[in-house]
Each structure stands twice: as C-alpha cells, then as structure tokens.
C-alpha cells in the first residue's frame, strides 16, 4: 500500500550534452542538437531512491524540433560533452520547423509558393 505524497514516482529532465547530427533534418541548421535525459524516479519522503525508465531525447536549438536519441548516443554525449550521431541514432518525434519568408520574415505554410505578406517567391 502506497501513501500518496510520501512514496511515489516522479520524473526529471537533465541536460546531458550535445550531439552532432551533421545538419538538422528539419531546418538544415548545422548547430549541434541539445541532448537531454528524462528519467523516472521512485521517491520516499521526497528523497529519490532509484531511477528507472530513463531515455534520451534531442532538440534542435534552431527550430526546436524534437528527436528521440538512442541510449548509446545519449551516453556518449553525457561522457564526451559532444558526440557524433551515427545513422539511426536520431529519430524525429516532432518537426517544429516553420519556414519563414526570406524577405520579410513572415512564417509561411509548408506548401506556400509565395509569401502572403510581401509576395516574394519562396
Ligand atoms: Zn532544426
Ligand atoms: Zn514576405
């Protein structure tokens, strides 16, 4: 029997390092992805007792797209600070890239041919 608030589970996100994925598949930025680790922990009296179910994910600092990162990549990033992502270690979860007009900066729909604000071909 668990006593709510005394024993329980929670999760934490901690920054692990950076991953060099060549370029972001969404926005083609060559800035390294930020790698973070999310883990669940079991606590009693607000003292974390053990961690379980951890996994890594990566975000692009340019477009904020979110990727699932393989454990092997997350562990290398945590150890070395920056790790080169191997093919298959990064999997796109959510593409947050928004195209914007090169002339006026208005955010465009992905299938726009012309900017709806200034008419520039994009
Ligand atoms: Zn990106
Ligand atoms: Zn425009």
Image (spheres, rainbow, N blue to C red):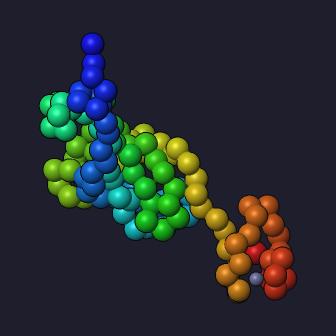
Q: Which residue: 27% across, 19% down? A: 2
Q: Which residue: 31% across, 27% down? A: 4
Where residue 15 appears, as percent x and y from the top left, is 27, 55
Identify which residue, 28 or 41, lies in the foreground.
41
Q: Which residue: 48% across, 51% down? A: 66
The image quadrant of residue 22 is bottom left
Q: Which residue: 80% across, 77% down? A: 115
Please tell me whether residue 117 is drawn above or below residue 77 in the rendered image.
Answer: below
Identify which residue, 50 or 26, lies in the foreground.
50
Q: Is residue 4 visible?
A: yes
Where residue 71 appears, as percent x and y from the top left, is 30, 37
Where residue 12 appears, as percent x and y from the top left, is 30, 44
Please tell me whether residue 111 is drawn above or below residue 113 in the rendered image.
Answer: above
**Residue pushed farthest top?**
1
Locate the N terminus and report the quarter of the image it occupies: top left
Does 12 sit left or right of 45 as displayed? right
Where residue 90 appears, as percent x and y from the top left, is 42, 45
Please tell me whether residue 44 is drawn above or below residue 78 in the rendered image.
Answer: above
Q: Is residue 83 visible?
A: no
């Amino acid at each position: 029997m668990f006593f709510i608030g005394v024993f329980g589970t929670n999760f934490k996100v901690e920054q692990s390092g950076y991953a060099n994925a060549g370029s972001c598949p969404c926005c083609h930025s060559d800035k390294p992805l930020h790698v973070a680790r999310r883990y669940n922990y079991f606590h009693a009296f607000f003292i974390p007792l053990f961690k379980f179910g951890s996994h890594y994910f990566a975000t692009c600092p340019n477009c904020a797209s979110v990727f699932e990162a393989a454990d092997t990549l997350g562990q290398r990033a945590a150890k070395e600070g920056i790790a080169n992502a191997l093919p298959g270690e990064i999997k796109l979860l959510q593409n947050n890239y928004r195209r914007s007009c090169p002339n006026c900066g208005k955010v465009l729909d992905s299938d726009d041919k012309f900017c709806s604000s200034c008419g520039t071909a994009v």
